[in-house]
Amino acid sequence: MTEEPYEKQRRRARRTEQPGEQPGAQAGAQPGEQPGGHRKVRSRRSKVLRAAAFTLAGLLVLGAGAGGYAYWKLNGNIKSVDINAQLGSARPPASAGGAFNVLVLGSDSRDGNNGNLAGGDTGGTARSDTAMVIHVNQDHSHASVVSIPRDTLVARPDCTDASGKKTAGARSAMYNSAFEVGGPACAVKTTEALTGLRMDHFVQIDFSGFAGFIDAIGGVDVTTTVNIHDKDSGLDLKAGTHHLNGDQSLAFVRTRHGVGDGSDLGRIELQKQMVKSIMAQVGDIGLTSNPAKLFSVADKLTRSMTTDSDLASVSALMGTANTLKGIGPDDMTMITLPVVTAPSDPNRVVAKKPQADQLWAALKGDQAVPQSIVASQPANPADSPSAKPGSGSSTGSSTGTSTGTSTPPAAG
């Protein structure tokens, strides 16, 4: 290598020196320090800081990318129905002052994986296997949840489904037939006719979605004081406490003939117990502090969810959840619509007057559920050994002991 001329070295050294510095000395060097030694230390430190900065930036980019992917994935899972467009303006007035109502349905469709889970045959149709009207009060401090027995005979209005097919109304039809003949919009329209309340939102979940959700949270614990054996749902439990997986939990909330009087009212009470178990399990696993677990649960749930178009996004669902975050189990009242055996059919029920009218009037006025209705709720068959399992298929009446009302709504 050719040696650099001496004068060129001096000129280059002068260009790098600061005013007042000794030629060849490193700025800030202490007496006796080797020239350039501090520069090497600072150079190494700068490289470390740059590497840390780039690593942090990379993590942030990856985190944002994962969050973006999760948002995109969950949004893509949700199916929606434009209820407002299908029903038009001939509806009860929209809720005001912050109060709102949500219709939650569990579908008994056998499509896809649902057929393997549920068994049986619905003739290629789907009905609302579970129906709950949730009323959230104006300041979002309390929620009232009303289960509507699927065997309730109601006046079903004329309906038009999403494809434009029209179905004539019926003076007396099973409540769950509305979903079967006209889909979500008809179920909403029928519920609004029954209650006089505007259903501001709609949420539907199917069998596989419920079972997958339970598995995603690690199963749930339930307790029964009687043996439950239902060959139709496949549930077989001895009296005691059991940890159920998704399929077993689905069988538990669908059980009718294996416990109590075999009625839909008894099944609704089992569903209420299941909700308590879900709330307890979700609290135990700490979803909010475990992003991976939270995504897994949300993925399972949204894949089997259908909502109205206003709720059909992760941001809208999160916004609603944030609105409800102040409502705990002690701030909820869960009841079953007061009913009596239908005069025309001992296997069907009709709304009990005037209690049913009093209930809907209270919710319409953003008032608490009347205590007389709370006190007349059916007994939980899992806690009531007096009835012989599978003793009948009648849905019975709403008289019985209170099962407690401080429980949140079920998913389906």
Image: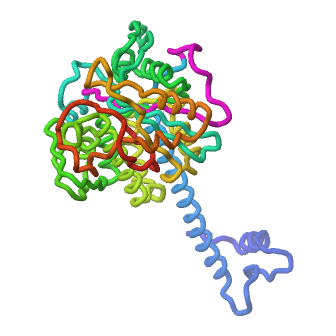
Q: Which residue extends farthest left?
A: 231
- Color theme of the render: rainbow
Q: Residue at x 26, y 24 (%)?
A: 346
Instruction: Find residue 198 and report its horizontal and vertical position in percent.
Output: 55, 25
Relative side of 176 to 102, left or right: left
Q: Quadrant of residue 96?
A: top right
Decide which of 20, 71 is in the foreground and name it.
71
Instruction: Find residue 244 and report its horizontal and vertical position in percent.
Output: 25, 52
Can residue 77 be seen here? The reply is no
Q: Residue at x 17, y 37 (%)?
A: 391
Q: Give the residues drawn in magenta, as a range.
A: 85-110
Q: Residue at x 73, y 80 (%)?
A: 26
Can residue 97 be seen here? The reply is yes
Instruction: Find residue 134 and report its horizontal and vertical position in percent.
Output: 49, 36
Decide which of 258, 131 is in the foreground and name it.
258
Indicate yes or no whether the magenta region holds residue 175.
no
Indicate yes or no whether the magenta region holds residue 105.
yes
Depicted 244 relative to depicted 205: above or below: below
- The quarter in which the C terminus is drawn is top left
Relative side of 354 to 367, left or right: left
Relative side of 310 to 31, left or right: left
- The quarter in which the N terminus is drawn is bottom right
Depicted 311 relative to depicted 278: above or below: above
Relative side of 158 to 319, left or right: left
Instruction: Find residue 130 and report its horizontal and vertical position in percent.
Output: 35, 33
Decide which of 316, 400 is in the foreground and name it.
400
